[in-house]
Amino acid sequence: MSSPAAGAVMALARTPAAASRYDLTPRATVVCAVLTLAAVTGLDLIDGRLGPAFAVGFVLVVLTAAAAVQERGLFTVGVLPPVLLVGALLLLASTVPDAIVIEGLPEATGVFGLTLNATIAHGVPLLIGHALAIAVIVARILSARR
């Protein structure tokens, strides 16, 4: 007896090229990345403030997105990290500004100022996540040429 799942496993075992059939479309990758980062952010906000779990989750989300997308979506995931981070921080700054805590920032800072400062404060996770995503993209391109 053969099931569809067993067929998929057999296809994955034969060649890496067959495995690429199961990659996500660019749109599905972006939707999954947004939903996953939203879930990570929600879990990190249980204590009321954004912390290291958000940074680690962000890096893992952009890394996974680069590994899971179809070849035609590599550009999309190449530009996704900064857009995803700024979008998440903009949404947080406009809905729960108390969650973003930055030393020395006046309380009267508006949404744009809070988003800008939060983006700067999360610059290291952005740099690490974007660099890893680009490394995965380059590795995928180089392995596809062989």
Image (cartoon, rainbow, N blue to C red):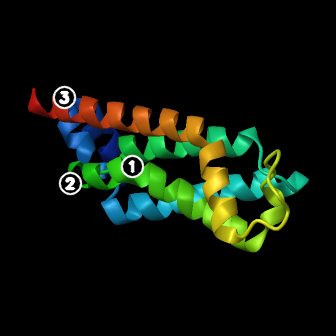
Q: Are marks 2 and 1 in contact (CB under 8 Å)?
A: no
The residue that mark 2 highlights is: 72
Above or below, 64 against 73 in this view is above
Q: Nearer the viewer, residue 53 or 97?
A: 97
Q: Nearer the viewer, residue 21 or 145?
A: 145
Give the mark, 2 or 1, whose residue is nearer the N terminus: 1
Q: CA distance from mark 3 to mark 2?
A: 15 Å
Which kind of residue does numbered mark 1 sit on?
A: Ala
Give the mark, 3 or 2, whose residue is nearer the N terminus: 2
User: Which residue is rendered at x = 58% and y = 35% of the image?
Assistant: 124
Q: CA distance from mark 2 to mark 1?
A: 25 Å
User: Which residue is rendered at x = 67% and y = 52% of the image?
Assistant: 118
Q: Residues within 10 Å of mark 1 (few under 14, many from 20)?
A: few
The residue that mark 3 highlights is: 143
Q: Are marks 3 and 2 in contact (CB under 8 Å)?
A: no
Which kind of residue does numbered mark 3 sit on?
A: Ser
Residue 21 placement (x, y as % from top left): 24, 50
Q: Are marks 3 and 1 in contact (CB under 8 Å)?
A: no
